[in-house]
Amino acid sequence: MRTTVLVLVLLPVCGQDRLGYDDTPHLPGGKWRVHDGRRPQPRVVTPGTKPGQAPSDAVVLFDGVDLSKWQKGNGSDAHWKVEDGYMEVLKGGAIDSRDHFGDCQLHIEWATPVEVKGKGQGRGNSGVYLMGRYEVQVLDSWNNKTYPDGQAAALYGQSPPLVNACRAPGEWQTYDIVFRSPRFAEGKLSSPARATVLHNGVIVQDAVKLIGATTHKRAAKYRPHSPKGPIRLQDHGNPVRYRNIWVRPLVAPQSDR
């Protein structure tokens, strides 16, 4: 009696019915293989239909209608002027977002006054603070010299922008900021904050390590603080305008860490 033995050979195929491979090397320091089809799929986010428009997963902090998402530092309501889709700095102090953030992507648009008054730090001065502590300077830096770590798009008192990408007074400008908050362990700094800033689409801060919380005329340093904080808009006495403000918290998927 003759017995016939069939040998089935499986060849690795990457087609429509197979997402990836299970015979490739593991990526260094991780649980996933190269081209691993079992790795979680990225979640779907719908981008805005226009440049600068908030994507579907963003927290919109100002849509041009009211200041319900903002408050003063003491918790009372914010009272800056709101008209024609923008808010304008009024004397009375800085305002903070009611929501708090750590690692995040921030989009914000701003304009300094059309009528030029003053010079240096006295011209169209305000600021955007991450976690209420780390300032990206807002200033009319169009044909307006000042100390480099205090001009528009500087990490104030620490890092001048790579270039001056400022538009003319009165024109709307954009900041797109990717911020990584500092980490503390047992009351000590374990990793510093980092900031990447695009000013009007031009990269001006490239993953810069901050040396501490923003200060004036002193070297910055860190003190332990909570892992989240507000977005703060500074009142420096100039009628700077803001619009279209939104934030995306940056959190890695738990299953992919």
Image: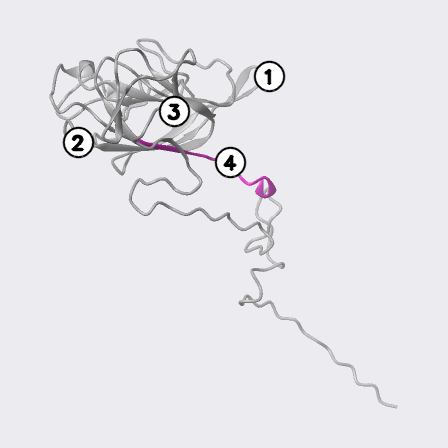
> For numbered disc 4, what is the local secondary structure?
loop
Residue bearing mark 1 = 186
Choose the circle earlier in sequence order: 4 or 2. Answer: 2
Q: Which mark is residue 68?
A: 3
Which of pointers 3 and 4 indicates the residue nearer the eye?
Answer: 3
Q: Give the alpha-carbon distance from disc 3 to disc 1, as whole Å.
A: 36 Å
Q: Please say if the residues under marks 1 and 4 sit with CB atoms less than 8 Å apart.
A: no
Above or below for 164 versus 34: above
| Mark closest to the chain's N terminus, 1 or 4 | 1
**Nearer to us in this view, 220 or 73:** 73
- Mark with earlier residue (3, 4): 3
In the rendered image, is residue 207 in sight?
Answer: no
Q: Is residue 225 left or right of residue 244?
A: right
Tell me if label 4 and label 2 are in contact, CB under 8 Å.
no
Query: CB under 8 Å between callouts 3 and 1?
Result: no
At x 50%, y 47%, the residue is 43
Element at label 2: loop
Coordinates of residue 210 in the picture (x, y in percent): 40, 22
- Looking at the rendered structure, the kind of residue marked 1 is Glu
Residue type beneath disc 3: Ser
Q: CA distance from mark 4 to mark 2?
A: 34 Å
Which quadrant does the N terminus fall into?
Answer: bottom right
Q: Nearer the viewer, residue 10 or 172?
A: 172
Mark 2, residue position: 171
Q: Position of residue 223 (x, y in %)?
A: 48, 13
Seen from the viewer's position, the closer of residues 93 and 196 is 93
Q: Which residue is mark 4?
A: 251
- The CA span between labels 3 and 2 is 26 Å
Secondary-structure class at tag 1: loop
